[in-house]
């Protein structure tokens, strides 16, 4: 009830009061652009950031593309999204911190509530935590630097590794890819930049916490990961957002390049406040014998549109997409995955699990393409939907396009409801109806949760429990 | 003080079809009863009704445990009062390990609050593990059982042993075994029978519901009841079981002026949803 001490700053927004991380710390931004977007705002942003000319030009070009692109007419309902009513750049602190002691107290308090320092103590080698648009806290273990791994926020990367960034930035997802990618390219801020040199294996996950904390602020982080030949890395990103009084937009772009023989795993759990539009473009390219995995958990938000994709560029590449979506009241999770087999003898697997509750809607949207000449490809798509009540909804929109011979493709979709017998069985053992439903839901997503690092599995289960609370009327 | 399950003039129907028609039965902690009857006589209906399966409609009557009327209580509240049902067809819960489930269940039935809205506080992991290991050893259950998903891909025999393990862990006052011998070969019946025997004592009352007397060779009841057409028509000692073994249900039907009714058989057949 900390909010009650500051009634003037807490706006009753009529969205979920159950949102556990919906606190709102009183952090004064160092710089905040005015609402809406034009070239002036972009130029101002570049000035404040002190960016090189090539990035300024890149942004301005992307802004042009954004203006030219028509609004999205598919997926979810974007009619409530007003691009002019958003702050595109907020800077919470004017320098990038590396030591915990240097982080401002009120920001620390927010991190404390999210368990960040604890996370760091326990298992982190490098923590990049994004507070509003700028990374304020970033701690890389010396060891990481010794083996030549670069793990910095993307703004820092522009300054310190300009050639490397310039070589890969926007090569997987060009500005013209889609309207939201163009927007991100124009106004991006923060995100992680990771480069793993040839043959280097990072054997602990690299993590970053992201958090929106300024009312009406769009968060447009930009992440770029390059795994050089034979390199291995696991990047983990967890997000919680506090609750705001009006619509908020999160639109990230994540680009990953998996060079020959490399292995990359990207794990995300997102739990946005339920007024956030979460429109994210994530794509990886996998070269010869490379192994790319997306693990993607989507909770919260008003609308999520997110389809991590993998382009299989050379023979022997393998890709996996595991997606969990949980849609509850007033939420639409439009999630899934895309795999494009551009080369022969590549393989992929998409597994999707969705849960709909209290009138929530989960959609699986998937695309599987095997291009002409990509012989000997194998792919398996499996989507399971669990519907918890009569008001909720689940849809499946799979697109499969095969233009090659000798291809082995499987697709399976299942929709189920929580069985009366399952509930009765568990309740007969002393569990309340809510506990029983929660247990069934946790069991449903267990095949994916067990792929998560321990601390995220725990968080995932806790989030599910939170979503299930008060679900029994 | 010994707790008693008392069923008084119970009437139960399924989709407007009366199945239980005025049943009376009392079971005290420490007693072993067998309720025997042919298919469709209402055995599973009784078991499910006592545990609170919402599929069944109670038309009239009373059921109490330790003097508390349970018919308006949720299944979990009945479990907290010390009632347990070993299911004929235990349901699979994919993704939920036996150990996690049991820890939750044991914590729930032992929690003080009978207020269903309170979240269950889990008993400490070490304490639970120690107890689970001991019970598994006692019942000769392999330790790998704890890591498997609840009833998921279990053989018929494994499911029944899992039910007995739950019985052992939850330590109810009154346990109903619904056709625990069904679908098992003779060795499996022996194993399950011997497991249940391990648990029998002054704190456990047992109601064995069965079609065939063979489980009773391993768990010897003090009281035998015959269920026909939704009523207990005869009660007695071991001699009743012997009579059944020898002559079947027909002499008893004749003595009570009953014939094998189509309705009885249909009643059981209308419950396919319970047999997943």
Image (cartoon, coloured by chain):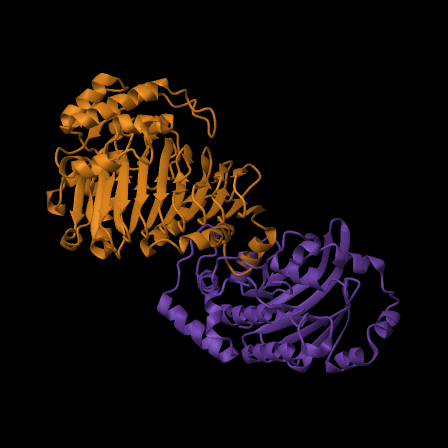
Chain colours: A orange, B purple
Residue B21: x and y in percent read 77, 59
Who is closer to the viewer here, B19 or A100?
A: A100
Q: Visible in this render: residue A11?
A: no
Answer left or right for A424 relative to B221. Answer: left
Residue located farthest toward the front when viewing the structure as drawn: A373
Who is closer to the viewer here, B228 or A212?
A: A212
Answer left or right for B213 relative to A191. Answer: right
- Quadrant of the drawing holding the N terminus of chain A: top left
Who is closer to the viewer here, A432 or B22?
A: A432
Who is closer to the viewer here, B41 or A403?
A: A403
Residue B139's place in the image compared with A210, above or below, is below
Answer left or right for A54 relative to A341. Answer: left
Q: Quadrant of residue A273?
A: top left
Residue A75: x and y in percent read 47, 30
Question: Which residue lies at the image location 81% right of the left edge and 81% below the top edge?
Answer: B246
Residue B11's place in the image compared with B32, above or below, is above
Question: Which residue lies at the image location 45% right of the left edge and 34% below the top edge?
Answer: A331
Q: Quadrant of residue A27?
A: top left
Q: Visible in this render: residue A98?
A: yes
Question: Which residue lies at the image location 45% right of the left edge and 40% below the top edge?
Answer: A336
Question: Which residue lies at the image location 82% right of the left edge and 75% below the top edge?
Answer: B248
Residue B143's place in the image compared with A81, above or below, is below
Residue A361: x and y in percent read 50, 36
Residue A256: x and y in percent read 31, 42
């Amino acid at each position: 009830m900390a909010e009650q001490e500051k009634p003037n700053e807490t706006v009753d927004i009529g969205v979920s009061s159950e949102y556990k991380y919906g606190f709102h710390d009183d952090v004064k931004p160092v710089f905040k652009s005015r609402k809406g977007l034009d070239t002036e705002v972009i130029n101002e942003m570049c000035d404040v950031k002190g960016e090189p000319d090539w990035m300024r030009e890149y942004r301005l070009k992307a802004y042009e593309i954004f203006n030219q692109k028509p609004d999205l007419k598919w997926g979810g309902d974007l009619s409530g999204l007003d691009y002019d009513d958003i702050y595109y750049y907020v800077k919470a602190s004017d320098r990038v911190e590396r030591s915990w002691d240097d982080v401002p107290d009120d920001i620390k308090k927010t991190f404390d509530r999210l368990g960040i320092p604890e996370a760091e103590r326990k298992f982190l080698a490098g923590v990049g935590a994004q507070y509003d648009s700028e990374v304020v806290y970033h701690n890389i273990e010396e060891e990481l630097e010794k083996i030549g791994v670069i793990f910095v926020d993307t703004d820092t990367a522009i300054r310190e590794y300009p050639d490397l960034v310039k070589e890969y930035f926007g090569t997987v997802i060009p500005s013209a890819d889609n309207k939201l990618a163009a927007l991100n390219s124009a106004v991006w801020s923060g995100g992680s930049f990771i480069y793993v040199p040839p043959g280097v294996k990072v054997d602990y996950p690299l993590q970053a916490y992201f958090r929106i904390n300024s009312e009406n602020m769009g968060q447009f982080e930009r992440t770029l990961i390059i795994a050089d030949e034979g390199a291995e890395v696991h990047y983990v990103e967890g997000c919680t957002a506090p609750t705001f009084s009006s619509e908020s937009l999160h639109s990230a772009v994540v680009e990953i390049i998996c060079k020959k023989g490399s292995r990359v795993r990207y794990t995300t759990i997102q739990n946005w406040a339920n007024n956030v539009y979460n429109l994210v473009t994530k794509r990886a390219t996998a070269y010869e014998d490379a192994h790319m995995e997306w693990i993607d958990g989507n909770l919260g938000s008003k609308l999520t549109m997110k389809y991590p994709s993998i382009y299989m560029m050379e023979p022997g590449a393998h890709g996996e997409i595991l997606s969990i979506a949980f849609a509850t009241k007033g939420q639409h999770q439009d999630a899934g995955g895309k795999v494009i087999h551009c080369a022969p003898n590549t393989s992929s697997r998409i597994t999707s699990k969705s849960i709909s509750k209290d009138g929530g809607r989960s959609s699986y949207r998937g695309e599987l393409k095997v291009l002409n000449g990509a012989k000997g490809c194998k792919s398996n798509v499996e989507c399971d939907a669990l519907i918890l009540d009569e008001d909720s909804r689940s849809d499946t929109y799979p697109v499969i396009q095969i233009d090659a011979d000798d291809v082995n493709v499987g697709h399976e979709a299942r929709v189920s409801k929580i069985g009366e017998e399952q509930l009765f069985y568990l309740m007969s053992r002393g569990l309340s109806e809510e506990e029983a439903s929660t247990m069934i839901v946790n069991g449903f997503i267990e095949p994916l949760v067990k792929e998560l690092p321990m601390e995220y599995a725990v968080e995932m289960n806790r989030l599910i429990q939170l979503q299930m609370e008060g679900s029994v009327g | 003080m010994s707790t008693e399950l008392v069923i008084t003039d119970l009437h139960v129907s399924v989709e407007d079809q009366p199945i239980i028609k005025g049943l009376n039965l009392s079971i005290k902690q420490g007693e072993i009863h067998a309720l025997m009857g042919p298919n469709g006589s209402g055995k599973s209906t009784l078991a499910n009704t006592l545990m609170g399966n919402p599929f069944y409609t109670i038309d009239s009557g009373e059921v109490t445990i330790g003097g508390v009327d349970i018919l308006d209580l949720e299944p979990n509240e009945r479990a907290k009062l010390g009632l347990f049902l070993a299911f004929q067809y235990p349901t699979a819960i994919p993704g939920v390990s036996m150990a996690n489930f049991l820890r939750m269940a044991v914590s729930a039935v032992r929690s003080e609050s009978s207020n269903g809205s309170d979240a269950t506080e889990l008993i400490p992991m070490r304490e639970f593990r120690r107890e689970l290991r001991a019970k598994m050893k006692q019942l000769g259950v392999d330790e790998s059982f704890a890591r498997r998903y609840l009833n998921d891909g279990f053989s018929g025999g494994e499911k029944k042993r899992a039910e007995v393990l739950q019985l052992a862990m939850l330590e109810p006052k009154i346990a109903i075994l619904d056709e625990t011998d069904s679908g098992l070969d003779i060795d499996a019946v022996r194993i399950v029978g011997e497991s249940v025997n391990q648990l029998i004592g002054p704190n456990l009352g047992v109601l064995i519901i069965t079609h065939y007397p063979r489980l009773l060779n391993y768990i010897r009841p003090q009281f035998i009841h015959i269920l026909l057409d939704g009523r207990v028509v005869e009660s007695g000692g071991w001699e009743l079981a012997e009579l059944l073994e020898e002559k079947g249900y027909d002499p008893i039907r004749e003595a009570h002026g009953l014939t094998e009714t189509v309705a009885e058989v249909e009643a059981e057949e209308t419950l396919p949803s319970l047999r997943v």
